[in-house]
Image: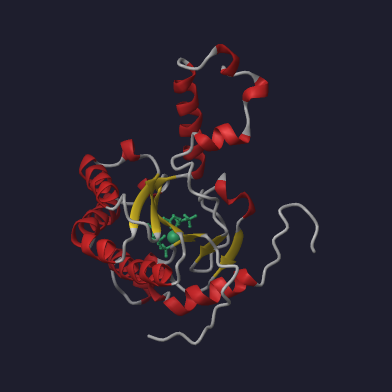
Amino acid sequence: MASSVVLARAPLPRHIGIIMDGNGRWAQRKNLLRTQGHLEGLKTAKKIVKAASDLHIQFLTLYVFSTENWKRTAEEVGFIMGLVKQHLKAELNFYRENRIRIRHTGDRGGLPPDIARELEEACEDTRSFEGLQVILALNYGGRDAIVRAVGRWLASLATEPSEKRLQHGNITEERIRGCLDNPDIPDPDLIIRTAGEYRTSNFLLWEGAYAEYYFSETLWPEWTEEDLRVAIVAYQRRERRFGGVGP
Ligand code: IPE
Ligand code: IPE
Ligand code: MG
């Protein structure tokens, strides 16, 4: 569908993060099971991935399942995990055709082994693609990501020369960043949250330090390419200062 929202060529956000919220409410409003909402949400996710790819966005991080989402019923958790697995299996051609690379952020070791395996295979299969990079935040928590980064750093100390060992002066932002899941990925420029919630819910705490936030009232299953464009236009009108002063 042609969109009526015209984007300026620049500055396009290099990296967009999306907190895809509102699947449950969408289903409840329609008198459906919450799981139906997740099914519909997955359709939206595929549409938005294609739209971001067509817009030549370089990185798109999708918040799929948080480290706190295990608090939900076993039925709902199992359904979401099953959906992810099925999607990665069935849609690999979609990613191949669009030269989209799949990546993961989150605690892979804490995922059911079959999901972790499927994810690893999808990442491996698409590793060489040079188009959009879609980062699936699955069993992801911003605090957990920092804890795991510190753990990696500590594990690496044994092999470090003594002058690089953990001392106060050696603890730098760059070294912590280097221990995150994907140190090569630039910080998100734009973080979108749908469904009228105004909180981070543990998403990209470190990397989102200077992201522009955009909140939408629309529930995720009803989000469209047009909404993505509107969010990007809003981003393009922002003045980013990074703690400095305006022009
Ligand atoms: C987001 O939708 C998807 C996940 C968190 C897995 P929700 O399931 O949180 O939907 P609401 O917030 O209950 O409407
Ligand atoms: C954040 O949404 C997690 C994902 C979208 C995967 P939640 O629905 O879990 O967040 P809260 O509970 O409203 O903060
Ligand atoms: Mg929610």
- 161 on left or right of 85: right
For the C terminus, which image quadrant?
bottom right
Is residue 80 shown left or right of residue 51?
Answer: left
Residue in view at x 55 percent, y 78 percent? 7
On screen, residue 20 above or below 26: above
Could you tell me which residue is drawn at 68 percent across and 23 percent down? 169
Q: Give the total number of marks visible in the rendering.
A: 0
Q: Position of residue 85 (x, y in %)?
A: 23, 53
Q: Depth check: 200 or 91 in front? A: 91
| Chosen colour scheme | secondary structure
Q: Quadrant of ligand 1?
A: bottom left
Quadrant placement of the N terminus: bottom left
* 34, above or below 114, in the image: below
Q: Could you say where residue 225 lies in the image, as x and y percent from the top left?
A: 43, 76
Whole-percent x, y for residue 20 in the image: 43, 63
Out of 114 and 182, give the one closest to the viewer.
182
Looking at the image, residue 64 lies above or below residue 214: above
Residue 186 or 86: which is nearer the viewer? 186
What residue is at 49 percent from the left and 22 percent from the top?
154
Q: Is residue 19 left or right of residue 74?
A: right
Q: Report whether 235 appears left or right of 145.
A: right
| Residue 150 position within the rendered picture, expressed as x and y whole percent measured from the top left | 51, 29
